[in-house]
Image: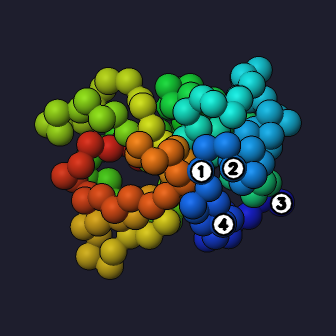
Amino acid sequence: MAYTREQTVALFKKYKGATTGSARHRDLVDTFNRVKPHGERGNYTCPWCAITTTAVLIKAGYTTKNMPMSYNCGTLVEDMKRLGVWVERDDYVPEIGDLIIYNWDDNGKGDCTRGAYHVGMIISVDKKGRTFKVIEGNKGTSETCGIRKMNISLDRKSVV
């Protein structure tokens, strides 16, 4: 049986601070490679946001039948659509455990219809529904598993 959303978030948080090449990073890549969603194989030098999210979902007991899993964000979006859980609405207020897909080139006007570049998992939403925090692998130039705070409806986002 798969973890609850809260348990999955707690599991993801255990990887906070993992850096490219560290033992925790290698554990995520190795977990991903045991399943190889869509036949893809990760390595220790590639961008690892989708690998991290997928590995956490695998560790939490999910499968490709009930959760999006992939090496890349574009395929994650296609999986979300196939599963009927894709939401492209800038005013959507996310819930803990939702996945978020980013497109850094989005102009912020209307819903984004461009490609997907980055993924993470919602770990908290403020009580007024104005901001949220997301944990993601391969965050920023430091290439760590870290937390980012974003504004709802103001930042470029798509959520599931």
> Label 2 to label 1, Cα distance in Å?
5 Å
> What is the CA distance from the residue labelled 2 to the residue labelled 3?
29 Å
Image mark count: 4
User: Is residue 7 shown above or below 36?
Assistant: below
Of residues 1 and 33, the one nearer the viewer is 33
User: The residue under label 1 is which amino acid type?
Assistant: Thr
Judge depth for marks 1 and 3 and give the one in front: 1
x, y percent for residue 21: 67, 43
Closest to the camera, between mark 2 and mark 3, is 2
Q: Position of residue 116 (x, y in %)?
A: 41, 29
Q: Which type of secondary structure does the marked residue at label 1 adopt?
A: loop
**Residue bearing mark 2:** 22
Is residue 74 visible to us here? yes
Q: Marks 1 and 3, Cα distance to the nearest angstrom?
A: 30 Å
Residue underneath mark 3: 1
Mark 4 or 2, nearer chain start: 4
Q: Looking at numbered disc 3 in the image, what kind of residue is underneath it?
A: Met
Q: Is residue 10 left or right of residue 146?
A: right
Q: Which residue is mark 4?
A: 14
Q: Nearer the viewer, mark 4 or mark 2?
A: 2
State the residue at coordinates (73%, 64%): 3
